[in-house]
Image: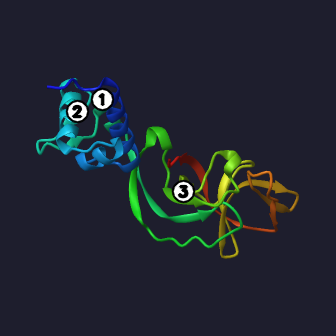
Amino acid sequence: MRTLNKNTLEKMEEYIQRYCIEKGVSPSYRNIMHSMGMTSLNLVQRYVLALESQGRIKRTNLGNIDTPQRLNKGEVTVAPLVGQIACGQPNFAEEKIEESFSLPQGIFGNGKLFMLRAFGNSMIDAGISAGDLLVLRQQDYADEGEIVVALVGEDATLKRFYKKGHKIVLHPENKTMKDIIVDDCQIQGVLVSCIKIY
């Protein structure tokens, strides 16, 4: 029988952990097969059984992968993914729940969380790229310098928040773009985290 690759074992364990954090459930064998570039579910099963025998993962009574115990500790907050947000000129963000994610409070904090998918390039200097998943805490206020979802009229945008006299400055993190300066806006949420999508 062929010896299993230690590097592949480690990558598979990392993938399972990351999938559990991001999705709130464990991946299927088919998910693993596609993500690891494997061509056989039988090969995936051999690696999964090896990880289980080493105590690195657990399986349920049905043979599915269980969430690793160290990821089960603590409370979670269910955050709905409610569409996309412009990282550029303001665009209307339709609130349409696409799916929901269980996020560990130990990493993302508590409060009412929601998620948006970023598009545009106005926040690239803050490390936010098109396609990233943004985790936000729903609130109607922000401190100076926080990255917020701001509603200007009916248009929503993701920018860094500042006050300048009686004006509000929505600052893009992109040196080629100008500030959006308004008399008033409605804060809908404050950025908690950005989950990179590669």
Kindly identify the amino acid type of the residue bearing the numbered disc 1: Leu
Picture layout, residue 189 above or below residue 128? below
Q: Are marks 1 and 3 in contact (CB under 8 Å)?
A: no
Q: Which residue is mark 3?
A: 131
* Labels 2 and 1 touching (C-beta < 8 A): yes
Which residue is pictured at 50% across the width and 49% down the height? Answer: 197
The structure residue drawn at horizontal position 43% and vertical position 67%, both measured from the top left corner, is 97
Q: Which residue is mark 2?
A: 47
Q: Residue furthest bottom?
A: 154
The label nearer to you, 1 versus 3, is: 1
Marked residue nearer the N-terminal end (2 or 3): 2
Q: Residue furthest left?
A: 61
**Kind of residue indicated by mark 3:** Gly
Left or right of residue 186, residue 113 in this image? left
Mark 1: few, some, or many residues within 10 Å (few <14, many ≥20)?
some
**Residue 171 location, x and y as percent?**
77, 55
Occupied quadrant, residue 121? bottom right
Residue 17 in picture, x, y percent from top left: 35, 37
Position of residue 182 relative to residue 177, above or below, is below
Kindly tell me whether residue 26 is visible in this rendering: no
Looking at the image, is mark 2 or mark 3 nearer the viewer? 2
Judged left or right of residue 49, residue 117 is right
Give residue 9's mark: 1
For the residues labelled 2 and 3, the Cα–Cα distance comes to 31 Å
Pointer 1 or 3: first along the chain? 1
